[in-house]
Image (spheres, helix red, strand yellow):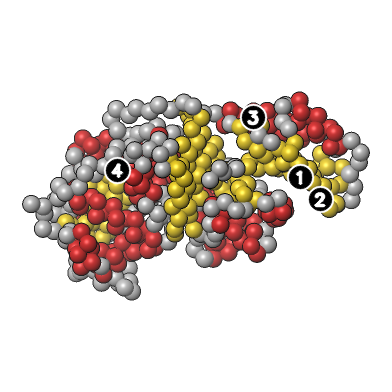
Amino acid sequence: MGKPEINVGLLGWGTVGTGVSKILINQKHQIYQNTGLNLNLLKVAKRTLPAQRTGVDLANNCLTTDVNTIVDNPDIDIVVELIGGIANSRELISRAIRNGKSIVTANKALIAECGADLYQLAQKQGVSLNFEASTAGGIPIIKTLRESFAGNKVESIYGIVNGTCNYILTEMQKNGRNFSEALKMAQERGYAEADPTLDIDGTDAAQKLTILVALAHHIKVPLNQVHTEGITKITQNDIQYAQELGYTVKLLAITKSRGTKIDVRVHPTLIPNDSMLANVSDAFNAVCVVGNAVGPTLFYGQGAGEMPTASAVVADIIDAARSINGNSHVPIPPAWASKPHSDFSIGLIDDIETRYYLKLVVQDCPGVLAQIGTILGNQDISISSVIQKEPHCKNSVSLIILTHKACEANMCQARIEIDNLEVVQEKLTLIRIEEFDF
């Protein structure tokens, strides 16, 4: 017989925390009907006490500024961490686990850096650590990889997992805005922070990718081993040229198996206009997982925002409550189990083979293409097509080159040599191309 009531405490009452409290309170009866669980929001901790919020009717004495009344409260069964950051959140979660409480968190930075230690501590204490909302907002990709893909070998994952970047690139493509204009719009709509660095430089997507790789391949990937590029160098010309060539520019988080090696990389990518991921617009997220048995699958939805992320948090609360009541299976452990084993190791970006989009601004004179072609040929890089665009300025033109598949290390060397040519007036722009067979 399980507990008649499961008490929940929230650490943090910002945008997502407000959404979680709305669902737990306003849909309490529906949750009971669907699951048989009686979830009670007992305490909510916030740094400063605000006025009551519209749509959230907290019980008397529920709101507090003292996190200890949640972490050390013997009546609370599940602690939900929505504070963010690493050091303080790690200390609070660790203490809550030692106090025998199950944990739910949406903190991707914490899970990416400290997931192994926290998971092992939770195993030792016999409680659960749930983190569905840490990756792709309302899309249940964590649960899917843990459970639905348990009978598959994951061959590849392609993810649009940062809504800020996807919104910016969509605005650049659909409405012709330049990067700075699109970024400003993202900030005005609440998609981007005042300091958007972690989004636009690719770090946010890289953190999420480490979590997906841990689940898919049972290997812990330090963040500094994820090849990471952001979208700050993508220009309106790149967007337009890609469209003319039949491609869309997306920031992709990619992991692919190559024998016993796996690629782990985040970077702007040209993908075919008719592909599923090319049509994921605005702040939406999508994750394509290819399994050896099931084939390609696509998971699509809101990647951020109050209610989509809150929905994922509440799903984790329900899973944790089921475990407490003994009517749920034990979650499949990721790479952070006490004795992890993986058939894979992390591959080097230099070893990948892919196609490339190259953009150059060169002098408008005879022999330029021959010089560039010679360098590429010497590195065993074959040209697929060349387009000369309108004059860039006096005595210069833009060249767009698409290559056949080539080794990354060879392309890096060719890039250095091309940039050193006297006829090249601006450093070469390089964007990798992913061609899907699904």
Q: Which mark is residue 407?
A: 3
Relative vertical location of residue 217 with respect to residue 299 in this rendering, above or below: above
Give the label, 4 or 2, closer to the camera: 2
- Answer with mark 2 or mark 3, whichever residue precedes in sequence: 2
Residue 97 falls in which quadrant of the image? top left
Q: Mark 4 = which residue?
A: 91
Residue visible at 34% across and 59% down?
Answer: 311
Callout 4: SS: helix
Identified by mark 4, the residue type is Glu
Q: Mark 1 = which residue?
A: 400
Callout 3: SS: strand
365 relative position to 68: left or right = right
Residue 231 position in % (x across, y down): 60, 49
Label 3 vs label 1: CA separation? 19 Å
Callout 2: SS: strand
Residue visible at 35% across and 50% down?
Answer: 132
Identified by mark 2, the residue type is Lys
Q: Are marks 2 and 3 in contact (CB under 8 Å)?
A: no
Most foreground residue, 277 or 366:
277
Q: Mark 2 = which residue?
A: 389
- Answer with mark 3 or mark 1, whichever residue precedes in sequence: 1
Q: Residues within 10 Å of mark 4 (few under 14, many from 20)?
A: few
Identified by mark 1, the residue type is Ile
